[in-house]
Amino acid sequence: MALRDIVVLGDPVLRTVAEEVREIDDSIRALAEDMMQTMMEAPGIGLAAPQVGVSLRLITLDLEEIHGPLVNPRIIRTSKEQESDLEACLSIPEVQGLVRRPSSIVVKGLDLDGRDAVIRAEGLVARCLQHEIDHLDGVVYLDRVSDPKVKVYYPVPDADGEGAVYESELVAVEEVRRRFEARYASKAPA
Ligand code: ZN
C-alpha cells in the first residue's frame, strides 16, 4: 500500500470523463487499497480515482454505513426530494459550499470481487456517493453550488503566535476557480 498524491482543481484529469474499469485485476486492487489509505490519511470520507490522477471509474468511501471501494458505480434512481448541505473536497482544499442534491438515491456498482453491489442511500451517504460519482464525469461540487459565493478558509496566527486558527471569507465561485487554476498553472510543467 502507498499514499498517492491528491490532485487539485486545475488539473485536467478532474475535468475528464473517466473510463469504465474493464477488468478487476491486481492493479485495480492495488489502486483501491492506495485510495483507501490516501483517503483515510487526508482525512476524507470519499475519494474518486481521478483525484489521484487515474481516469478510471473507481471510488472509495469511509462512512459508518459503507467502508470500501466501489467499481463502476452508477446512479440508477434518484428521489424527487432534494436537500441542501455544505460540501468540501480534498481536491479543492479549504473551501466549503452549499449544494442541493436528491436526498436519496440507488447506486449500482461492483465490489472488488466483481460481485454486484446495490446501495440504497440517503443523507450523508447519498450526498457523498453523488459527489464522488460526479468526479467520474469530470464534475466538481463547485459546479453545483447554489450560492454565488463559497466559504474560503485561511489560517490566522493565534494570540500567542504558536498556532493558527481558521477564519473564513465569502468568495465568488468564479474567483475560487481562477485561484486554483492559476496555482495549478504555476506548478505544472511547461
Ligand atoms: Zn471531491
Image: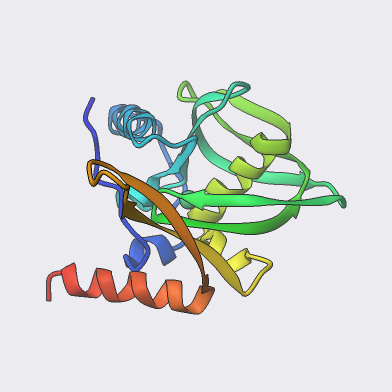
**Visual colour scheme:** rainbow
Q: Residue at x 29, y 29 (%)?
A: 30
Q: Position of residue 42 (x, y in %)?
A: 35, 37
In the rendered image, residue 187, in percent from the top left (x then y), is placed at 17, 68
| On screen, residue 2 above or below 128 | above
- Which corner quadrant holds the C terminus? bottom left
Q: Quadrant of residue 8?
A: bottom left
Q: Is residue 9 visible to us here?
A: yes
Say whether residue 18 is visible. no
Name the residue nearer the viewer: 126 or 92. 92
At x 24%, y 40%, the residue is 4
Above/below status of 77 relative to 117: below
Residue 171, x across and y down, in percent = 50, 72
Residue 6: percent from left, percent from top: 30, 48
Q: Is residue 138 above or below residue 83?
A: below
Q: Nearer the viewer, residue 23 or 117?
A: 117
Q: Quadrant of the N terminus?
A: top left
**Is 107 displayed left or right of 26 in the figure?**
right
- Tell me the quarter of the picture where residue 185 sits: bottom left
Q: Quadrant of residue 103?
A: top right
Farthest residue in the right direction? 80
> Measured along the vertical axis of the image, is residue 111 above or below residue 141?
above
Residue at 87% x, 52% y: name it.
80
| Residue most extreme to the left | 190
**Residue in front for this viewpoint, 105 or 108:** 105
